[in-house]
Image (cartoon, rainbow, N blue to C red):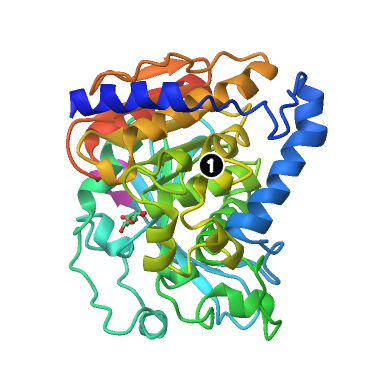
Amino acid sequence: MRNTLKLIATALIASLSLVANAQPDGRIVRSKRQWIKERRPELMEMLRSQMFGREPGKAPDLHATILEESADAFGGLATRRQIKLSFDKEEKYYLTLLMYIPNDRKGPVPAFLGANFKGNHATTTDPAVLMPTEDKLATYAPGYQVEPRNTNGHRWEYEYILKHGYAVATFCYNDVDPDFHDGFHNGVHQLMDGDKPRDGESWATISAWAWGLSRCLDYLETVKEVNAKKVAVIGHSRLGKTSLWAGATDQRFALVISNDSGCSGAAIARRKFGETLEVINRNFPHWFCDNYKSYNGREEKMPWDQHELIAMIAPRPVYVASASEDDWADPVGEYFSLVGAASVYKLFGYEGITDRKVPEIEHPVVVGRMGHHIRRGEHNVRLYDWQQFVSFADRFLK
Ligand code: GTR
């Protein structure tokens, strides 16, 4: 893998020089003001109309009902709170948020927020975590099987996170929009769009998950134990693509982490290494807006690339994590989107990652407000990843 990494990196340097403060017509954005007033809105418009679709505003009637709460989670380490977060008055559309708040705290604590794949119950051994509800399961993909408790517990190092002074909150992504192509009939598209006809720019599923993260942040703003100005949004894989888009569209997120986000996440599209646009749009036609499909096989024609998605997060801290065996997600391309975004962090007066040599496996790099590592091993989230995320967050959120 190491040799492959080096090889690909060299090829990339020879073939590409992507810098986020350069516009396609060659003009360079030279000031923070110009970035904020001109280029960022222009890019936002491009990403909305060409990639993720146009997300709607807030939910019509966001309200929270506490379903369960106990101060004795993990042997008294944390308070567990389970919340029904409804988006409409009738409570037809809702997600169930699982929160843990460290009991040892002096004031409001920073938090990690991320969606999960297999349900809240699958993120932990904690037997009190509620199972998915029947009405929700009825909207999930045909044949959906509920996973046993703790199936994905290794991805959610709750005790580690809590011991480091952070609250953590998660919900099942299917609760916001089930992860299959249902013609946008299930999930929040119905609530927000009703019968409005869809077009090439209509928001799709990744955008809906990101919207769900923002609604959770709306709620966290009302939770007195949490400092909502210090919420890190995190996601793995398709949910890493989602956390990047959530971080771009909602500047209230104080820090953004993508783990193995790959194609249409942190990875530079023009490299066409691992998953390509054609493959992702074929296998997951519901993730992106229809206009995105027009770039299938034409990555070099895209008027943007993924380093510009990273740049949208500036000047907030951003962390991109990869795994050494995860060629499908193109670890090298993920690294180079940080390098490409560094010029925009510079406009804000912050250093960024600019070294064109891809770091060695398990040699985390933090420069200014950017962080990166390549964990040894497979496409996944592990304790090693959380150790780096927490130590990165400690610099900015404590
Ligand atoms: C894969 C997909 C990737 C990534 C991954 C995941 O099948 O090709 O883009 O999102 O799923 O979410 O685990």
Q: Is residue 185 visible?
A: yes
User: Residue at coordinates 28% horizontally, 46% vertically from top-left?
Assistant: 328
User: Residue at coordinates 35% horizontally, 33% vertically from top-left?
Assistant: 321
Q: Report the amino acid beneath label 1.
A: Val
For label 1, the residue is 226
Q: How many marks?
A: 1
Image side of residue 343 versus residue 174, left or right: right
What x and y, as percent, mark residue 346?
63, 16
Picture quadrant where residue 164 is located: top left
Residue 365 vertical placement versus 12 (above, below): above
Name the foreground residue: 231 vs 315.
315
Name the foreground residue: 58 vs 15.
15
Q: Is mark 1 on a helix, strand or loop?
A: strand
Name the foreground residue: 234 vs 323.
323
Name the foreground residue: 41 vs 394.
41
What x and y, as percent, mark residue 190?
60, 80
What x and y, as percent, mark residue 332?
35, 31
Query: Magenta residues, as a range?
Result: 72-77
Picture quadrant where residue 311 is located: top right
Residue 35 vertical placement versus 295 (above, below): above
Image side of residue 247 versus residue 3, left or right: right
Picture quadrant where residue 208 is located: bottom right
User: Residue at coordinates 53% horizontally, 26% vertically from top-left?
Assistant: 340
What x and y, as percent, mark residue 62?
64, 67
Image side of residue 306 versus residue 202, left or right: left
Residue 114 vertical placement versus 40 (above, below): below
Q: Does the magenta stretch include residue 65?
A: no
Q: Is residue 398 visible?
A: no
- Looking at the figure, which quarter contains the N terminus? top left
Quarter of the picture for ligand 1? bottom left
